[in-house]
Image: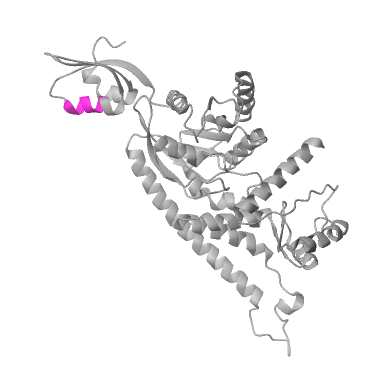
Amino acid sequence: MRESLETAEESLNELAVLAESAGACVVEKVLQSRPAFDQATLIGSGKLDELKPLVKALEVNLVLFDHELGVTQQRNLEKHFDVKVLDRTQLILDIFARRARTREGQLQVELAQLKYLLPRLTGRGAAMSRLGGGIGTRGPGETKLETDRRRIHHRIKKIERDLAAVRGSRGVQRRLRQAVPLMTLALVGYTNAGKSTLFNRLTGSGVLADARMFATLDPTVRQLVLPSRRKVLLSDTVGFIRNLPTTLVEAFRATLEEVVESRLLIHVVDASAPAAAEHCAHVRQVLAEIGAESTPQILVLNKSDCLPADSAYRDALARRLSGESGGCPAAWVSARTGEHLEALLALIDSNLPEDPVVDARFLLPLSEYAALDLLHSCGRVLEEKFTESGCEIHAEVPESILRRLAAYVSPATA
């Protein structure tokens, strides 16, 4: 019971952060424990009578519930409190609607909102139903409720067609990227874990990095050069969260395809968060829902500057969080200060699932400027010496480059 109570408190605190991210000012938090939900109001008449004077005294104009509300429950609560009532899903949808910047993101949010709204359309009893047949009972035709439902169904179909077109365009872009031998890596993690800050540090980009939840909704892809001189594409994606609405997971599948198609996932976790282990578990749950649970991962323990420098404490925390993420390799970093980024890049370099780096020696004719440029741009040159017979180079290069320059490989290569 203690664990479930702690989880409920963490979820309630997270709801408060979500509310602040949406621009609300949280004035009070109330946690209720009861054996079962009340069918009419979720919280029961006793709790309603307890909260009503509190709502009035604090002069609030919005009450948020950390649980999905049914249509009847929401209507009864608003009638009792005489203020607007929203649940967690509606709040997240509102935040997504505010943050979506691209056309694709806006379509995805609207689709999720309409799918959430459709089953919640309610009428006014018999007055909103179709009139029966017979003399004196013929009505004007379609009612407002049925018209609304029909319009929403048509809008959903149009958005799905538009998103299918976006998905096709994204597929073309992905195939063009895949025509160039560059692997795609994706940053994933709980919302507000520091993914965008790390993305900017690694790629030198200017992606919005904000302490508010869901500051980044639209995916961004940039090139990243690893210590071995291999070039990869790094994608920054939307943050995950506990109890992520199913409608959002479905709507954002097009965006999350960047995660599914990636060859390596860089799972960023806020190691300073008390619920870091739970955050890792929630991320793995969403990855399983989108079919990316088997993709190789690296765990990035971010915000190391906010933790004690005690190595024993950090090692124990790393083992625990790595276990929550399937035992993947881990690295400590601080995206804010840039601490240990070199170690992270080296870990990424050593864990790429294909095209390993090999040690090789080459003997290039002096006229082969293109091959020399390829070694410098796509490999790490350790030694270079010009002689009368050509250019002798000792370098660490990906196997794909070694195969391309097989004609110039020196017999001294092991």
Eyeballing the image, is 120 above or below 335? Answer: below
Tell me where residue 147 sits by quadrant.
bottom right
Does residue 120 belong to the magenta stretch? Answer: no
Q: Is residue 47 left or right of residue 317?
A: right
Percent x, y of residue 111: 55, 59
Q: Residue furthest left?
A: 388
Q: Residue furthest bottom?
A: 136
Eyeballing the image, is 356 above or below 153? Answer: above
Percent x, y of residue 7: 74, 40
Tell me where residue 39 sits by quadrant.
bottom right
Can you see residue 360? yes
Percent x, y of residue 141: 64, 82
User: Residue at coordinates 54% horizontally, 58% vertically from top-left?
Assistant: 98
Quarter of the image containing the C terminus? top left
User: Residue at coordinates 26% horizontally, 24% vertically from top-left?
Assistant: 375
User: Residue at coordinates 70% horizontally, 45% vertically from top-left?
Assistant: 13
Magenta region, residue range = 369-375
